[in-house]
Image: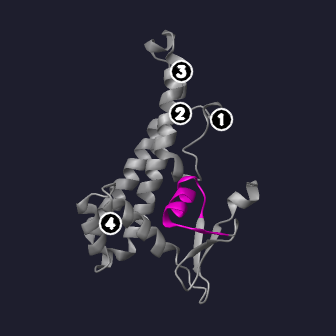
C-alpha cells in the first residue's frame, strides 16, 4: 500500500442493506475486518451511501461492544458507569479531552519504556542472549500497543534519541493528570 493511501482514511460506505463496502478494494467487509484495519494502524471513515452521514463513531462503539460481550473486557465496569454518567452531567464537555489526554499519556509512557529498554545498561547486558531477550521484550511491547499510533508504538530502537529529561517529562505528565483530575472532581 502506498504511503499516501495509508495517510488518508479508508472510506467504507454503508449500503441501505446495512452491508459495508470497502471503496479501496471494491468488496464487502465485516466489523471484524474494520477492527483489523484499525489495529493495523489505518484510519477508517464510515459513511451512509444514501445520506452521506458519518457513521464511524457508531460502528467503533459497536466493535467495542462486541469485543466486550465476548469476554474481552478492557473497560472496567466503573469506567463504563462513569462514561454513562458523563452523558447526563456537565462533565460531558471534559470527559472527551480527559480520555484523549489519558490515552496520549499511555502512548508516551509506552514510548519511554521502549527508549529506556534500548538505552539503559544493566548488569544482565553482558549475559549471552541478552540482546535477543531485549528484542523480544520490545516486540512484545510493540504488539501490545501496536494500533495506538498509526500502527506503531513508538520510535524504532535505532531511531531513538537520547532519553535525557525523562524525569521532567514524567513529572509534567503527572502534573497534567492531577490537573485533569482536579477539574473532574470540581464538576
Q: Which residue is mark 3?
A: 132
Mark 2, other Cα within 10 Å: few <14 / some 14–19 / many ≥20: many
Q: Which residue is mark 4?
A: 183
For the residues labelled 1 and 3, the Cα–Cα distance comes to 18 Å
- Sequence order check, earlier mark of 2 and 3: 2
- Sequence order check, earlier mark of 4 and 1: 1
Q: Nearer the viewer, residue 144 or 12?
A: 12
> Of the residues tagged 1 and 3, which is closer to the observer?
3
* 29 is within the stretch colored magenta: yes
Q: Quadrant of residue 184?
A: bottom left
Mark 4, other Cα within 10 Å: few <14 / some 14–19 / many ≥20: few
Magenta region, residue range: 27-43
Asked whether residue 120 is in view, the answer is no
Circles 1 and 2: CB atoms closer than 8 Å: no
Q: Which residue is mark 1?
A: 159
Give the numbered dot on residue 115: 2
Asked whether residue 128 is in view, the answer is yes
> Of the residues tagged 4 and 1, which is closer to the observer?
1
Look at the picture and state if 46 lies above or below 114: below
For the residues labelled 2 and 3, the Cα–Cα distance comes to 16 Å
Q: Secondary structure at mark 3?
A: helix
For the residues labelled 3 and 4, the Cα–Cα distance comes to 45 Å
Q: Secondary structure at mark 2?
A: helix
- Sequence order check, earlier mark of 1 and 3: 3
Could you say where residue 187 lies in the image, as x and y percent from the top left? 27, 72
The residue that appears at 43% across and 42% down in the rendered structure is: 170
> Of the residues tagged 4 and 2, which is closer to the observer?
2
Amino acid at each position: 500500500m502506498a504511503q499516501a493511501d495509508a495517510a488518508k482514511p479508508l472510506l467504507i460506505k454503508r449500503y441501505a442493506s446495512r452491508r459495508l463496502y470497502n471503496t479501496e478494494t471494491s468488496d464487502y467487509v465485516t466489523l471484524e475486518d474494520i477492527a483489523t484495519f484499525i489495529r493495523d494502524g489505518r484510519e477508517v471513515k464510515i459513511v451512509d451511501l444514501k445520506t452521506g452521514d458519518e457513521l464511524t463513531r457508531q460502528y467503533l462503539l459497536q466493535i467495542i461492544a462486541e469485543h466486550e460481550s465476548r469476554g474481552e473486557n478492557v473497560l472496567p465496569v466503573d469506567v463504563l458507569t462513569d462514561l454513562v454518567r458523563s452523558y447526563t452531567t456537565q462533565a460531558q464537555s471534559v470527559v472527551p479531552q480527559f480520555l484523549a489526554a489519558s490515552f496520549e499519556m499511555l502512548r508516551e509512557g509506552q514510548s519511554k519504556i521502549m527508549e529506556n529498554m534500548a538505552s539503559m545498561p544493566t548488569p544482565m547486558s553482558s549475559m549471552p542472549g541478552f540482546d535477543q531477550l531485549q528484542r523480544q521484550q520490545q516486540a512484545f511491547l510493540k504488539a501490545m500497543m501496536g494500533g495506538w499510533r498509526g500502527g506503531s508504538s513508538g520510535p524504532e530502537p535505532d531511531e531513538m534519541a537520547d532519553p535525557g529529561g525523562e524525569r521532567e517529562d514524567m513529572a509534567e505528565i503527572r502534573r497534567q493528570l492531577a490537573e485533569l483530575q482536579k477539574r473532574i472532581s470540581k464538576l
